[in-house]
Image: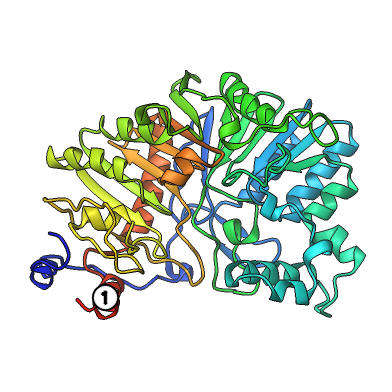
Amino acid sequence: MRWGIGFGLGLLLFVGVSSQFRSEATLPTLTPLPQDPYIQAYFNQNQAAVYTDPYRQITRHGDDLEQVVVEAIALAQVSIDIAVHEFALPGIAHALAAKQAAGIPVRVIVENTYSTPMAKRGNPAAIAQLDEHHQDKASDQFDFIDANQDGVLSEAELRDRDALTILAGASIPLLDDTADGSKGSGLMHHKFMVVDGRTVLTGSTNWTLSCIHGDFNDPDSRGNANSMLVIDSQPLAQRFQQEFDLMWGDGPGGAPNSRFGLQKPHRPSALVSPPGSVLEVQFSPTSKTKPWPESVNGLIAKTLGQATQSVHLALFVFSEQAISDQLRPVAHRGVRIKTLIDPGFAYRSYSEGLDMLGLTLPDHNCKRDSSVPWANPVTTVGVPGLPPGDKLHHKFAVLDQTTVLVGSQNWSQAANTTNDENLLVIRNATVAAHFEREFQRLYDGAALGMTPQLQGAIARQQEKCGL
C-alpha cells in the first residue's frame, strides 16, 4: 500500500514487537559453537564468550576482535598487508611495529578521511570545526589518547595510544585512496588483512574502539555489532592480495600507479574451495556500464534467490532497490524472511525495509523516491535492541542455515558502484551456525513491524509534508 492512499488503515495491519535492550550482566553465557578448522567466525557481542576490554577494563560478553587480529599478526613469518577503512587501535599498531622491527614487512592502506595522525588534527579548535559525527569521533579518540586527561596530547601519549603515530614511528609504509592522484575513491571501505599470502581476516569490523570494544567515553557502549572471519586459504588470500596490490601500486614515494574505485578493472566473482567449504568472492566497485548481475549486489541478489527455507538479514543499511525487487519473489514462494536494519537507517525514505513492510515515505524534501512497496508485505522487519550509542554494523545474511553472505559491502548502490568493497559467499553449515546464533541474539530483542520509532517517523513526515 502506498503512503497517502488509505495510509492510516493500512498501517494498523502491522503489529510491533518491542523490547528494551537487556543488560549483558543479566544474560547467560552460552556454550561455544564448534569452529570450522579453516574458517573461524568471531563476534564482538558474542554471548558465548567473555573478555575484558583492554582500555576501559570492562568485562563483558563478546570475542575480543582486537586480540584476534593481534594473534594473527603474531603468527606472521613473511608479510602482512592491511586495507582497513579506519585504524585507531594501538594494541594492533604496537603488534605491527614489533613485526616490522623483526624484519617482516608490513603495508597499510586506509581511507583518506582517517589517514592523518592525531598530532596533526587533534587540537580542540580543529575538532570544533568538524561536523557533529566526526567531531564526536575525534573527541572520543582525543580523550582516549589523553591518558592523564590534561587536555594536551604529549609525544609520549601519542606514541603509546595513537595508532597512526605508532605506525609512522615504526617506519611502516601507509597510503590512502588519494594515492591514485584523485581526491579519494567513494570510500576505501575494506576491512581486511592478508598474512603470509595464506590467511585472510575480513568482515564488517573497522579497527576502532567504537567498532570493537565500545565508545571510550560511554561505559554502556559495547561496540557496534560486528563480525570478523579468520580464513586459512591460500587461493582466497591470493584474491585479496591482488585487490591490495591494485590499490598499493608502487606504494608511497613510487610511481603514482595506485588504483582505487572505478580505476580498478572489473573483477568478476571467483570460486575457491577450502576443505569442507565452497567460497565465492567478489570485489566492488562495478561500473554502471556493466550489467548489474555482474556486480557484487547482483551476486547478493542471485544468492538470495537460491534460498528455499529461510533468509535472515542483519544489515547496517539496505537501500539497493534491485536487491529488494529480487528478494520479493523469494518471500512470495514461501521462504521465511526476517530482516534487521540499523535504527539509524531502517526508516529513512530510501530503506528497503519500508518496501518489505509494504510502506513508502517521502524524503526530507517531501518527494517520493522510486521505492516499490511489497504487495504482500512481511512484518518480520525491524530494528535490534542495542546498547546506547552502538550501531548494527553487520552486513550479513544467513540462508537456509547453510550459507552466509558477509563482507565490508553495505547493500547500497554507492557500495556497489563507487566504493572499494568485498563480499564473501560461504557455503558451510558450521560457519552459518555462528551467524545464525548472532542473528537470533539480535532478533530476540528486536522491535518489529510498526514500531514506535517508525510511527514517529511517519507522524513527522505527515506533519512536515502536510499529508
Q: Residue at x 72, y 33 (%)?
A: 81
Q: Residue at x 35, y 68 (%)?
A: 365
User: Is 106 placed left or right of 56 in the picture?
Assistant: right
Image location (x, y in percent) of residue 396? 41, 44
The residue carrying mark 1 is: 465
Q: Quadrant of the C terminus?
A: bottom left
Image location (x, y in percent) of residue 418? 51, 41
Quadrant in which residue 54 is drawn: bottom right
Q: Residue at x 27, y 44 (%)?
A: 324
Residue 71 position (above or below residue 132):
above
Kind of residue at disc 1: Cys
Question: Of residues 192 and 368, which is closer to you in this image?
Answer: 368
At label 1, counting other C-alpha atoms closer than 10 Å, the crowd grade (few under 14, some 14-19, many 20 or more) is: some
Residue 456 position (above or below residue 241):
below
Q: Residue at x 31, y 30 (%)?
A: 302
User: What is the count of numbered marks?
Assistant: 1
Image location (x, y in percent) of residue 62? 53, 55
Question: Of residues 3 and 51, which is closer to you in this image?
Answer: 3
Mark 1 residue element: helix
